[in-house]
Image (cartoon, rainbow, N blue to C red):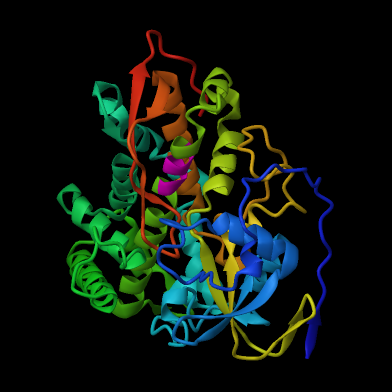
Amino acid sequence: MTAVTTAHESGAAATMTMPPSRCPMRNATFDLTDPTLHSEGDPHAVWRAMRQHDPVSRQFTPAGKPFWSVTKYDDAQIVLRDHTLFTSERGTLLNILGTDDPAGGKQMAVTDPPSHARMREPLQRALSIKAVEVHRETIRAMVVKLIEPMADGVFDFAEAMTAMPMAVTGTLMGLPSEDWAQLTRLTTAAIAPDDPEFMLADSVEATLATAHRELFAYFQDAVHARQKAPGDDLISFLMSIDLDGRKMSLGEIMSNCYSLLLGANVTTPHVASAAMATQTRTGVFEDWAAHPDLAVRGTEEALRWASPASHFMRYAVQDVELRGKQIAAGDAVVVWLGSANRDEDVFAEPYTFDIRRRPNRHVAFGVGSHFCVGHTVAKVTLRLLFTEMLSRYCDFEVVGKPQLLRSNFVAGHSHLPITARLRTERGPVGY
């Protein structure tokens, strides 16, 4: 038995006034695997109670499959950082709990070090801030085009944001713009197969199978095209990576293309929508617009606030003790990122959107070796979005009922009707 002890950071614990509600830990009917977790439930109330009363808890799916839930920041760090204790190679999402991921060892997201590093390091260099800055003006132009209709009447902000990452990643991957809408729909179906708007077949399982089949077929054709005529894009770059004297196989390239696209479409759009849905009447946007120098810190806070990727799963490699709980080798362990990013022991006033928050060691992109490889692209895109939006528009107002994705993995919006007013004089920008 390997004992793991955690040293809590001495973050200021704020006195919070939370909405009155029954304590979820005293009512064992909650189900964190429910696809309506975000669209109809209140996961933050459940997570807060779990952090206080049972931060490492044994739970079961409705089908009786067991897993451990981890809700505290320090415990999340241990599970996600230490691959010698917790492996990613059997799968990282609850929707395949108990079934080993066939991409294990082939796709970066489900490959442990040291093999993971051989795939990641070249791609990380290709997506470094220096490399991404080359495309900044292209990204800025795409962002501006998406938000141009904002002052023309009721504007579906979430729908526009959903299109944003595909425009950026599609450009970097050299994918034709006429394919972007369908690729966005397919990746959304892959992460929210229970959502009626995005179901591609008559069941969740069939929707997942259809989305995966069509995405992999698309990337197979894209790889074949690059084999005939390599270009200056991420797919061609993946094909050139050297893995101990060999190139990636077709399956590895397709799997990593899928992972890159999925990662982009999961994070970027829902960060902006979460901020818009909750902060229009708080004064945050006016404050941010008046202080464009806070673009970096404001973007980091938006990431913490949204925590769009709700969870990551690992499997215990050996017997582990975590907060006095005995986790057996082979047990599934699910880290709830949205909970870790509201941990009162780490974040002062965690339920306050603070564009001046410092430090802000959020885990919205994960931690450790699996820290999102596309985080630079996402941050640059979001920074450009918030800066351009706040310098051009004001008086944002949500004017209809927001619609959230039906998914226990993505905390995100599918529709968010808003209105805004064009500024009479454009405000300062701070990229």
Q: Is residue 54 left or right of residue 178?
A: right
Front in this rendered view, residue 359 or 115: 359
In the image, 103: left or right of 368?
Answer: left
Residue 290: image quadrant is top right
- Tell me residue 4's x, y (percent): 79, 78
Q: Is residue 19 visible?
A: yes
* Relative vertical location of residue 253 with respect to residue 263 in this rendering, above or below: below
Predominant SS along the magenta part = helix
Q: In the rendered image, which quarter is residue 227 located in?
A: bottom left
Q: Is residue 326 left or right of residue 302?
A: right
Magenta stretch in the rendered image: 270-275
The answer to which image quadrant residue 324 occupies is bottom right
Answer yes or no: is residue 257 visible: no
Residue that lies at the very extreme toward the left in this rendered image: 178
Residue appearing at x 63%, y 48% in the figure:
20
> Residue reaching furthest top?
424
Is residue 232 inside the magenta stretch? no
Q: Residue at x 82, y 60 (%)?
A: 8
Q: Residue at x 50, y 56 (%)?
A: 125
Quadrant in the picture for the N terminus: bottom right
Please indicate whether residue 372 sits to the left or right of residue 346 in the image. left
Q: Position of residue 361 (x, y in %)?
A: 68, 50
Q: Nearer the viewer, residue 422 or 20?
A: 20
Where is residue 320 shown, x and y percent of the image? 73, 85
Is 71 drawn above or below residue 281 in the view shown? below
Q: Position of residue 194 (x, y in %)?
A: 31, 67
Please tell me which residue lies in front, 117 or 4. Answer: 4
